[in-house]
Amino acid sequence: MQPPDVKASVSPLTKREQEILELLAQGKNNQEIADALFITPGTVRVHVHTILQKLEVRDRTQATILAIQQGLVVGAKLDPPRH
């Protein structure tokens, strides 16, 4: 089953949702995203929930994969694993 064509089938993401999706694609957790954007982790959770709904996916991993496949994030730079 192919993923839906996000650009054509769902409401566009807001600028803030796009920022959060970029950080998700970099492997950031909610606290790291909150710190980077100067918002609370609870606000991040709300945005992530909305992103998942708009992209019609079940979890952050699927959102990241779909975002990269659909070009919703530009060259997601992955940080090296933390030890």
Image (cartoon, rainbow, N blue to C red):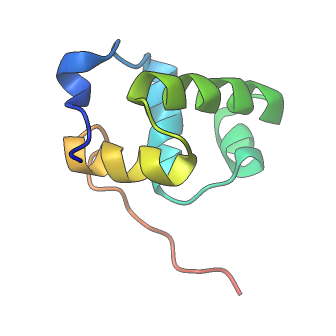
Q: Residue at x 52, y 32 (%)?
A: 52
Q: Residue furthest top?
A: 11
77 or 46: nearer the eye? Answer: 46
In screen coordinates, is 11 left or right of 14?
Answer: left
Q: Residue furthest bottom?
A: 83
Dividing the picture into quarters, in which one does residue 33 lie?
A: top right
Q: Percent x, y for residue 49? A: 63, 28
Q: Residue at x 48, y 33 (%)?
A: 19
| Above or below for 81 versus 13 | below
Q: Residue furthest front?
A: 1
Q: Residue at x 72, y 45 (%)?
A: 30
Dividing the picture into quarters, in which one does residue 71 lie?
A: top left
10 or 83: nearer the eye? Answer: 10
In screen coordinates, is 6 left or right of 77?
Answer: left
Q: Percent x, y for residue 38? A: 72, 32
Quadrant of the image for the C terminus?
bottom right
Q: Percent x, y for residue 28? A: 61, 55
| Above or below for 23 versus 55 | below
Q: Residue at x 21, y 24 (%)?
A: 7
| Above or below for 64 versus 7 | below
19 or 58: nearer the eye? Answer: 58
Dividing the picture into quarters, in which one does residue 14 lie?
A: top left
